[in-house]
Amino acid sequence: MLISSLLLGCGNLEDTISKIPTQMQEDLLENWQKKSDDHQKLYKQYLHRADKRKVLKLLPDLHDEAFEKIDCLQCANCCKSYSPRFKTPDIKRIAKYLKMKEGDFINTYLFIDSEGDYVLRSKPCPFLGADNYCTIYEERPSDCHRFPYTDEDVFIKRQQLTQKNSSFCPIVYYVLEKLIAAK
């Protein structure tokens, strides 16, 4: 349900977001995957037309709010359905941590995708534990460290990536829905 029509004339976006009732915020996460699927066209339109400066100003607070409401360890969809890029510094650092030669690490865990990036050979991530904790958390790839990009310009600059991420990450979904509600 879009509540933007209820929010017309509420002033600046920060005030508008803070006025969204708590129950609506909780309802927002119920059946989030179906809602995300249903809203993909809306997300595309929003990301294309959004005032980039306003969005970038709102992202840090929405990012923090989403992480307060959503426990990544209860989800781990990113680790189950997404492969980060492994850049050279990531490969060197992780191989050293695992006490492996870089070549052995690459041959065991990675392949080069169609875009020329090293990515994981398998899903879920081989470093994801049964408890959804990352077994190489302190040494994880920079893509994992930055994911879901809800507090940086990648969120608005790489619109297709943001849309894709909204289909499996409740935090991306949450931030998009809050932005749309506040427009």
Image (cartoon, rainbow, N blue to C red):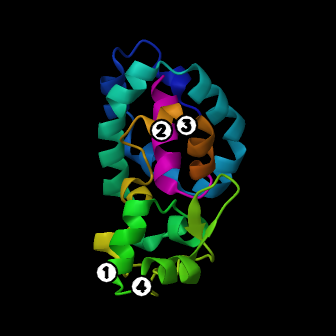
Q: Amino acid at mark 4?
A: Asp
**Would you call the spot at circle 2 few (<14 residues within 10 Å), some (14-19), or many (20 or more)?**
many
Q: Secondary structure at mark 4?
A: loop
Q: Which residue is mark 1?
A: 97
Identify which residue, 153 or 29, lies in the foreground.
Answer: 153
**Would you call the spot at circle 3 few (<14 residues within 10 Å), some (14-19), or many (20 or more)?**
few
Q: Amino acid at mark 1?
A: Tyr
Q: Which mark is residue 4?
A: none
Q: Which residue is mark 3?
A: 158
Q: Earlier in the sequence, mark 1 or mark 4?
A: 1
Q: Label 1, label 4: how many angstroms apart (C-alpha)?
A: 21 Å
Residue at (63% x, 56% y) in the render: 33
Predominant secondary structure, magenta span: helix
**Would you call the spot at circle 1 few (<14 residues within 10 Å), some (14-19), or many (20 or more)?**
few
Residue at (46% x, 80% y) in the render: 128
Residue 175: within the magenta? yes
Q: Label 1, label 2: how many angstroms apart (C-alpha)?
A: 30 Å
Q: Which residue is mark 4?
A: 131
Q: Which mark is residue 155?
A: 2
Q: Earlier in the sequence, mark 4 or mark 3?
A: 4
Q: Label 2, label 3: how many angstroms apart (C-alpha)?
A: 6 Å
Q: Which residues are drawn in magenta?
A: 167-183
Q: Amino acid at mark 3?
A: Arg
Up-down relation of residue 15 to residue 146 (above or below) = above
